[in-house]
Structures are given as structure tokens and as C-alpha cells.
Amino acid sequence: MSFDVAKVLKERHGENFTLHSDLLNPQLARVLKTLGFDRFYVRGEGCYLYDDKGDQYLDFLAGFGVYALGRSHPAIKQALHQAIDLDLPNMVQLDCALLPGLLAEQLVARAHEGIRRVYFCNSGTEATESAIKFARRATGRPRVLFCDHAFHGLTTGSLALNGGKEFKEGFGPLLPGATQVPFGDIDALAAELRRGDVAAFVAEPIQGKGVNVASDAYWQGAQALCRKHRTLLVADEVQVGMGRTGKFFAHEHYGLEPDIITISKALSGGYVPVGAVMCTDKVFMSVYSSLERAMVHSTTFGRNQLAMVAGLATLDTFEQEGIVEHTRETGEAFEAALAPLVERYEMLHAVRGKGLMLGLVFGKPESRSLRVRWNALEAVRTALFSQMVVVPLFHRHRILTQVAADNMNVIKLLPPLVAGQQEVDYFVAALDDVLRDAHHGSGLLMEFGTTMAKSALRRGGSKPVMAPA
């Protein structure tokens, strides 16, 4: 009899955390139990997750941006079912299949005129690794610049471009020539570029870790400096691209024309991992410069038919449903709805970002009584307040969010792009409820402490750990 996934899920239901603790990552299981996030999800649809008790959760993580079209979108499902039933000749390898060419055609059509070629891989970090190799080959230079707080992936090359020390500890030495510059500091960037040995400046148009935004002037200056010093500009659009900011590519907001663009996550439609490196003809052909170099950079699964179908169906759905424009409108509605909360609550300082990539920025209040409470929390652990907001959003209101970065009082909102006014209203009302408690008494602190204590008892009294960003 063929494998019956429904039967297996039913028979082994409830073993999730035990299996992860015994065979996979025990620390992830520990973190989730500590925060009381240990749920047994059984279904996902649109903007929502459903657990084994039938409870509904509003998903404002969207798989770190994978689910731009929400979970289980019928158009993507239908296309993949059809592709499987067609018994397509997949991964022949010594072949030029049609579907990769069609997806490349669609992507190139959405980019600026200088982008003419596409290389397909499996993930965002693979796209970053490829961009590093392409840039070094095209320029003949060794160094790569990146920004503080940057996140470009966790494989060895992309890890070298990570602005968070916590990710790098114990994995060095990493890629030589990787140099960090402050995000938004044009003078620091200019000083490094003047050395004349920089292959590429790799940057996220809006940073995922912290939802940091630089000025239009900075980006225009950065592009001009890269052109002047013959350094390639690489736009990492893995999370922030594909419509998330209200434009198809986030770099469009700043009038940029990158030499290389990396994408992934949302291109998958939420089903089949895929990544892509889009670049100029000059850069691409410097890598694949002769018959002998036809396979000099490749990956086994990169052009697989199901990934191509998922990408094509995703782009078609974007057009059919007007996703980019919808995202822009919903993002504006979100910012408008959050603005009164910034005025009302001293600890909520700002909302930053674009479209449906937003950061709620918390900071020290002005009132003496609130300031004393804030300082006490910060003395226990930097950025504890933001985690204290994430936990009741989940437990009280069943909303899944994340702290935007370790040691940073910012909560990142990354809802599916199909979210609408209903989801905006629900989230804002929930945040209002949580912040009201935070500003009027110790109820929020007690609730957070109770959650930690109950979790510690379940785990036998071991020390609590914080959730990853």
C-alpha cells in the first residue's frame, strides 16, 4: 500500500516536540515551550493557522515572508497538482527545459532594463553565495561590503555578510575580505570603496533585522559611489522583495538599478523552495564565459520543474489578484491605524518600514513611573519589553509575531500580502489591549512571568531562554 500521510499524522499526533527534542533541534523545542508557543498546528489557510483544538491564529510571520499569497492558495495548489499529473521530465540536467526559461522571462520583465539573465537555485542563502561568486568573477576583486544588522543567510559565505555577531560565534574564520559598514552611513561606505578592491556592496533595501530604513539620499549616493568605483551593487530582495513593500522590488522606491538582485521566499508560492539571482548580461557572461565554463556554477535542484511551476503560478496570481497594489493600500491602512497608538502610548515610539514589512519601535517612556518600570526590565535583559508584547499577543489574541532582532526593542510585522482591513483591525485592537496593560500597571509583567514560570515547571525548572529573532 502507498504511503498514507493522513494516517501517519493521525497515528503520531502529539509527538512533535518529543521527536524534535530527541532527533532534531532540542533548543528550538525548548524556546517554544518556554514562551508557551508549543502548539500542534494541523492546517493553514490564507492568513491563518489552526491547531488541533480548532483554535485560529493570525499568522504575522508568514513563514519569514514565504507566504506572500497566504497558506494553501488554490491557484498554486492547482498548478502543482497539474504539473505532477503531467509526469514532466524533471531534472534531466543535460537539457534546456521550457519552464525555467519562461520563469526567467517573467522575472526579467519585472526588473529594470539592465537585468537580462537569471540563475536559479534553492534558497535565499544560495542566492547570496552565488552573488558573491558572480561579483568576484566579474570584477576580479576580493572584498565584499555589507551593513551592520544585515542578514543574507547562514551558509558560510552569506554568514560572513551577517551583521549579527550571535550568528557567527564559533563558525570562523569566515570569508576573507567581508567588511562591515554602518547602514545608512554614506561616508563610511565611500571610505571603503575608495580602496578600489571591493567587488560588491550587498545590502537589503530595507533591513529585515530591525526593519531599518535608510534615506533616499543615502541610496542614491551609494549607487553613485558604486558606479564611480566600479563596484557591483547587489540588492538582497529575498524577504523584502516580491511586492512586500508595495512595489515589486523594494529597491524601486529609491530609483536604484542594481547589477545583481537576489530573490527567494515568496517566489515559492509557499510550496517548493526556490531562489534566483538576476543580473546584467555582463556579470552573468563573465561567469559563463566559454563552453568549458558552461557548468562552472550549478546546483542539482535549481531548475526543477515543480519550483518553476510554483514560481510561474505565483507571478500569475500576483497579476490576477493585483497583489502589489493591494499590499500598498493595506500597508497605508496599517500605518494609519497604528498612528493613534503611537500618540497614545509612550513606549511605542514609531512605526517604520513600507507596505507590509513594518517594525513597531519601542523605547524608554517620558513619565517617571513608566521609566522606572522600563529601566527595571532592561536591567534584566535588553529588549525584554518587546518580547513581553509578543507573548500576550499570542496567548491572549492568538497572533503570531516576532521580535525583529536580538537585543532590539522592535517587533516585526510580516503578514501575508493577501491580508486586508479585517486583519489590520484585529491586530491593532489586540496591540491596543496589550499596550494598555503595559502602561497601566504590572499586569503584563505578571502575565509574562506566569508564562515563563509555568513553562519552567513543565521543563523541570531549567533556565528560560528567549525566542530567536
Image (tube, grey):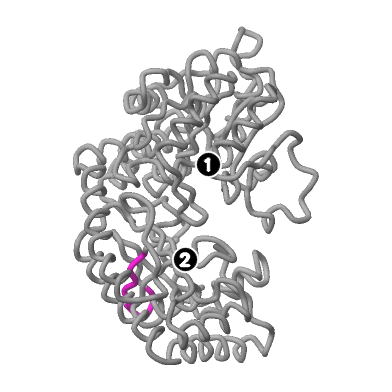
- Residue 99's tag is none
Q: Amino acid at mark 1?
A: Ser
Residue at screen point 47% across, 85% down: 368
Q: What range of the chain is rendered magenta? A: 51-59
Residue at screen point 65% across, 32% down: 191
Is 367 rendered above or below residue 217? below
Number of numbered discs on residues: 2
Viewed as shown, does residue 344 lie left or right of 361?
left
Alpha carbon distance from label 2 to label 1 = 21 Å
Viewed as shown, does residue 464 lie left or right of 61?
right
Magenta stretch holds residue 52:
yes
Magenta stretch holds residue 220:
no
Say which quadrant the C terminus sits in: bottom right
Disc 2 + disc 1, Cβ < 8 Å:
no
Where residue 25 appears, as percent x and y from the top left, is 65, 65
Sequence-wise, the earlier of marks 2 and 1 is: 1
- Crowd rating for badge 2 (residues with CA inside 10 Å; few <14, some 14–19, many 20+): many
- Residue 123's tag is 1
- Residue 402's tag is 2
Residue at screen point 32% across, 42% down: 243
Where residue 11 appears, as percent x and y from the top left, is 48, 73
Name the element at disc 2: strand
Residue at screen point 42% across, 36% down: 217
Viewed as shown, does residue 50 lie left or right of 328?
right
